[in-house]
Image (tube, rainbow, N blue to C red):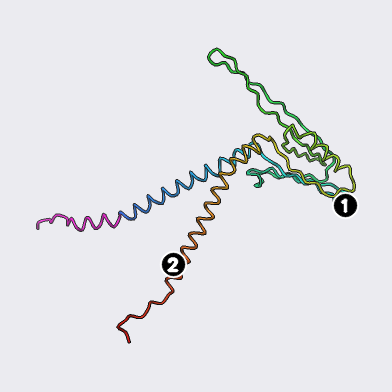
Amino acid sequence: MRNLPPDPQATDGLSQTHKPARSLAARLAQFLFYQLLALALFVGFPALVTAIAPVSWVKFERRDGQVSATARVCLLFVLPYKTMRVSPVLGIGDRFVGGTVTRTNRVGRDRATKSEDEGFLVIHGDGQVAEVPVTPFNLKSVVQRSTDFLEDQQATELKLFLVANWKFSVVMGGLISLLTLLYVSALVFGGIAKVGQILRIAVAGTGEAPPSAGRP
């Protein structure tokens, strides 16, 4: 019995059947790749920068003669990645770390670079210590305000917004955080537009078709 050659039309039909599946998988992979890239650029990078030079929210409270403190170190200004609690607060101190000088020799020229100075508000408790990053420029005034609250028995609450470094935390961090705001806004508006499109399709699908002209 002679073997018949494969039908070209049947082969083309089979390839066309598998082609949409492969195309859908490729489009899905491409979509996921671009989403991960956008997430890393618009969220991951700003989060990393603002975590290196963070801002902190510190709250002192006095209840029944006892002072407690809660410090939240945040990235992107509002997302806490580290929370420290001290209760009762027994004392206030500070810690200063001077920047280090690094010398490099390039093409016969010496170059010295100095890292940024660092300051910390130190909150002492009963076996507890919390160190909150504060720019050295504001460190003295922050320590004074915290000490005044601790000594004033009539004060009930003190809230502090602390910046680790004005240049990196606020100026650069604020500008870079705009990328995250842009990305989130695009997601929100895109989601609203998609929901509106789905609602329009649903409303159009529930409408009744008009009667034909020839029907009595």
Taking the image as shown, residue 134 lies to the left or right of residue 149, namely left
Question: Which of 76 and 167 lies nearest the eye of the viewer?
Answer: 167
- First along the sequence among labels 2 and 1: 1
Which image quadrant is residue 99 in?
top right
Quarter of the rendering occupied by the N terminus: bottom left
Residues 141 and 97: in front is: 141
Q: Residues within 10 Å of mark 2 (few under 14, many from 20)?
A: few
Badge 2 amino acid:
Ile
Q: Single out the mark in the foreground, 2 or 1.
A: 2
Q: Which mark is residue 51?
A: none
Q: Which residue is mark 2?
A: 201
| Position above or below: 108 against 91 | above
Residue 97 versus residue 171 in the image, above or below: above
Q: Within the magenta stretch, is there residue 95? A: no
Q: Are marks 2 and 1 in contact (CB under 8 Å)?
A: no
Q: Amino acid at mark 1?
A: Asp
Rendered image quadrant of residue 160: top right
Q: Which mark is residue 64?
A: 1
Badge 1 local density, few (<14 within 10 Å), some, or many (20+)? few
Secondary structure at badge 1 equals loop
Identify the residue at image location x=70%, y=36%.
164
